[in-house]
Image (cartoon, coloured by chain):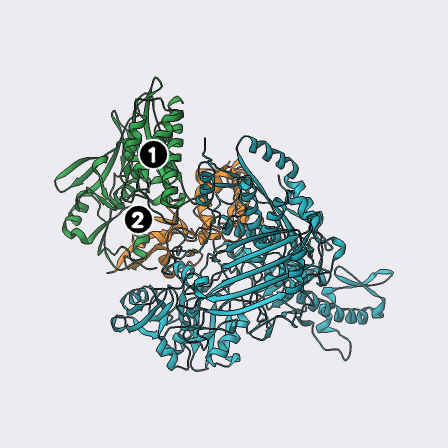
Chain colours: A orange, B cyan, C green
Amino acid sequence: MGRTVKLTVNGQEVSREVEPRLLLVHFIREDLNLTGTHIGCDTTSCGACTINMDGKAVKSCTIFAVQADGRSIETIEGMAQNGLHPLQEGFWEKHGLQCGYCTPGMIMCANAFLKENPQPTEEEIRWAISGNLCRCTGYVKIVEAIQYAANKIQAQAAQPSETKEVVA
Amino acid sequence: MSITESDKDVRITTPADVCGMGHRMKRKEDPRFIQGAGHYVDDIKLPGMLYLDIVRSPHAHAKILNIDASAALALPGVLAVITGQDLKAAGNLHMMPTLMSDTQMVLPIEKVVYYAQEVCAVVATSRYIAADAVELVKVDYEPLPAVVDPFQALKDEVIVREDKEKKSNHVWHWETGNKDATDEVFSRSSKVVKQKMHIPRIHVSSIETCGMVADWDKINEHMTIYMTSQAPHAHRTVVSLVSGIPEHKIRVISPDIGGGFGGKVPVYPGYVCTIVASLVTGKPVKWIEDRSENLQADSFARDYHIDAELAADANGKITGLRVKTLADDGAADAAANPSKFPAGLYSIGTGSYDMEAAHFEVDAAYTTKPPGGVAYRCSFRVTEAVHMIERMTDIMAHDLGQDPAEFRMKNFIKKEQFPYHSPTGWDYDSGDYHRALRLAMDLIGYEDLRKEQAEKRQRGELMGIGISSFTEIVGAGPSKDFDILGIKMFDSCEIRIHPTGSAIVRIGVQTQGQGHETTFAQIVAEELGLPASAITVEHGDTDTAPYGLGTYASRSTPTAGAAAAVAARKIRDKARKIAAYLLEANEEDLEWDVNKFMVKGSPTRAKTIQEIAFAAYTNFPQGMEAGMEAVNYYDPPNLTFPFGSYICVVDIDKGTGEVKVRRFVAVDDCGNIINPLIVEGQIHGGLTMGLAPALFEEIVYDENGQNLSGTFMDYLLPTSMETPKWELGKTVTPSPHHPIGAKGVGESPTVGAPPAIANAVVDALWHLGVRHLEIPITPPKIWKILRDNGIDED
Amino acid sequence: MIPGKFEYFAPSSVKEAIGLLDRYGEDAKILAGGQSLIPAMRFRLAQPEILVDINRIEGLDYIRELDDYLAIGAMTREASLEKSALISQRYPLLADTAKVIADPLVRNMATVGGNLAHADPANDHPATMLAYDATLVAEGPDGDTIIGIDDFFLGLFETSLAKDQILKEIRLPKPGPGSGGAYLKIERKVGDYAVVGVAIQLTVENGTVTAARIGLTNVAGAPMRAKNAEAALIGNAPTGDILEKAGQAAAAECEPWSDLRGSEEYKRDMVRIVTKRAIRKAVERVGA
């Protein structure tokens, strides 16, 4: 019954044999031991399992691992590159988390969102995270965290990076 | 408007590098959570680990005729199916005590008494095989009539608990206050308002469900338990008492917890089955609930049917309160209350108002619903009490034709009356209710809103303004009154200062997101001047943390927070001795300044806490014990009484009955603030968990006792779109008896918000003759009123 | 919540998929976006033995305006509809609909074809496509079949698609002069299925409604048109009493039931209210 899936996870190629019914979230958590992606419901309601697949934010509890064959996925574990990602920084600075359980899903949701909409309004942010439930924060500081990240990413983009300067 | 950044009342005595109380310190625990390195129970994977899944009842009430597990056992990978009979044979483990000294089934022998009740447990080599095996267990039932309505239950036509000696669905009767005095007050009061109300069954629904990994080490006869526990020590004791495993052979580890809110206080059958499965198989066993199991079978909150009467004199001065209540306990009294308080702290229901007399009576009934009575982010039934008194106050004000704000101002306990002895026997430690309400009114622009409302009403538009001026009662509690299963409700802290001046602080309470790793470091930093960044806070491991009763009911800061300050002060006392020795001065000649002892009058002659810590291991006075550590088990002299005033503005859609919360201002007073950033987060979250039952959440049963709201598709947690942008304000009235003047804050907003919202909706509709609406106030309820009054959108 | 076992196929062409459907008949189920099917499988409410994943088939994900109609590939994700400038400018009824289906993350996976083929009256696209008078293209062993939307929905979870047919394309008439549309939905919270939903597409000429189609969400056992409401509108100016008449007609002809979302009576009245509001919004868009 096993099927081989090959995919890119946080930039690394992985290949595993899986049962077709294996949910992607279980594949990520159990087979790859990337436990930052969480499970909070059975009905595609809570978004704790949100990852990015080919750049889009999706709920990994409602995708079979076999569907991810050949695709590229990114999880919370892949976010920090040369230091924290601005979203991670924003959640820390603005107290955008309490128990931390919804946080990876929120960050991954916001990650895909900010790529499409780099300068969102508060209303647009609230809309973007409306498929991710948080029971602790009341969302106010999550919104602030995402705004922080948007500003930081904008500022970084506006400034030529050091490498570019060296090349020039 | 951003009110949240104003820290003008926050007391700060330490510089930023020390980061004691009052600093907006970024949380120390966050780096792991934002990088996906949090460590929750389901993240634990042990070699050879098995998985447990549970067969549940499709009936609310049914005899079990037969359980046939043969097909399940024949499935490759299935190791065991555990039934109630197996547990009974293993030493009557099929029943377990509840925290309220009732009993509850772990697994049934004869009948099931609620929908989704655990019927038997399947143990397999994988989560997927266990789920397959659950489908293969055949259970024959003979359905019995469900008992859904607690008033009907009291007629005893169908007995829920036939296993008990008393063949009745009446569980207990409890009363407090002075009945005769209250009756007398009512007889001479010119105005009495009456209202029945139901505070419906709701569910905490932390985003992480409950779960456990039990790991029985046969050789050493030692059980390690990883558990979603808000109270690991209490759970260790319960496990020892139930299983007979000596307590020193049990280690309970509560790792990162994905939200608790009271739902992770009780012991659930799934936990016991998991422990038994590990004992039986000699392997580690994991059990993680599904969301549906969590919503359908775990402890509920609330479910109080209230009949209240409030009396006032001709001048509109409240004189007395008389309350009768029926509590729907479900199939067992499994509330998580202190033992002496079957109805929790419900008698705080006289609220923020000075009155002559009050009397509370509560009865409890068994029904065929899941047992419980946990908090949902509230201190033992305070939410029910506050909803009742704040609704009654509003009804009285409206009935008397008085502005609800003015009416409250007139009836508040005055600042100079504190400490205030309430008619039900509580001693409120401190308060300044007038100031908090006035601030809330100023922040929201109360008088202008009333004008706007009057104008809109002229035009037929529906707008309402609701107030709630609540008094909380938290920090259980003083040992003379407060215990759980006999264990007094102290809490604890142990501090060790390392030679190089960093420290470890271990506490008996257990964070589920409240930020203990940060706030407790700040408390100790405040007391000792060590940088909070150099202080590790550890909790949740019963092998290392001092015994404590855990985190719920906003008790961490009032109890363990006090213990941390007291333990730190013990260390400071020793530090003074060492400093005197090092400085060759008399102890009495030394004074403390942020982080050092100095000789009075010669500030250059000083020793920092770091220097003193090093000396405690390297150069201490002859005869003194080496090292620098202290422990304190803090027994609070009283509870603390946080308070606040909330004002909510709603607009109602005349066409659909939809309620839009336009603005919500929350002024909270939780005494001295340890970390404003964290306090704001707690209030935002608490307000959202107040909004939820006011407008959205309810666990609904049909007449057969089936749970109709057993998934997140029908149990409606608010999203970012339903949640308003909360506006906060604060006053600071320190607790006079708490070592750092703090009071606890996590639950105030959950307690205070629902009546503010309900009052706003009723306020919008009062001119139509509406006195009360049951929460959750859903659009269909409002729609009915609108159409009954001939109101349509055009 | 773990799905039961199944055998998995990921065909790379429609033909191959049809072959699988043909071979396995009732045992097979198509996996499109999976956002309804997978939760149903997790609850074991659906236990297909064979899953035919059509996500690997190229060329089913597109939005193209042709001479006569707008063509939408069946595997077009809801998010693509939501973000399409063409759709938001020229097909506001569809844009409204895409925005309120489930939540933003679900919309990244969920497909318009899956939403229709599932034939759940609680889904939002059926009402919208009824209002648009959409045409569906399905392929089976004997080639393509064109199905008018009025002939597509047969009942709850039931369509006129044969077991071995695959929905490939949805065609919407291009908006003519004076046309406008809107979808309005009452939901208990974001992400919820509709308490009621009303889709309307109409044409107004010289102040008179000359054409109107109205679809209703979640108020009958199958996706339905509010034909009496349409009749009340056509030939009249869409104002005042006429709106009320149309709303009342829709309220009378729908067949809601009482549940957690409200009583039958409440839902009927919401159909009345929302129908009126949707008409107003559609008419406003005619002007715009």
Q: For the point 31% across and 74% down, which residue is it?
A: B79
> Earlier along the polypeptide chain: callout 1 or callout 2?
2
Question: Relative to residue B213, is residue C101 depicted above or below?
Answer: above
Please tell me in which quadrant of the rendered image residue C78 appears.
top left
Residue C86 visible (yes or no): no
x%, y% of residue C264? Answer: 35, 44
Q: Quadrant of residue B743?
A: bottom right
Residues behind callouts 1 and 2 on a single chain = yes
The residue beneath circle 2 is C34
B293 left or right of B499 in image? left
Q: Residue at x 66, y 66 (%)?
A: B564
Position of B260 with respect to B675 (left or right) is: left
Question: The residue under label 1 is which amino acid type?
Answer: Ala
Placement of C178 over or under A145, stated as above or below: above
| Chain designation of label 1 | C
Residue at the extreme front: B187
Residue B399 or residue B394, whichever sits in front: B399
Q: Is residue B270 left or right of residue B472?
A: left
* Figure quadrant of the N terminus of chain B: top right
Identity, as a three-letter code, of the amino acid under mark 2: Gly
Q: Residues within 10 Å of mark 2 (few under 14, many from 20)?
A: many
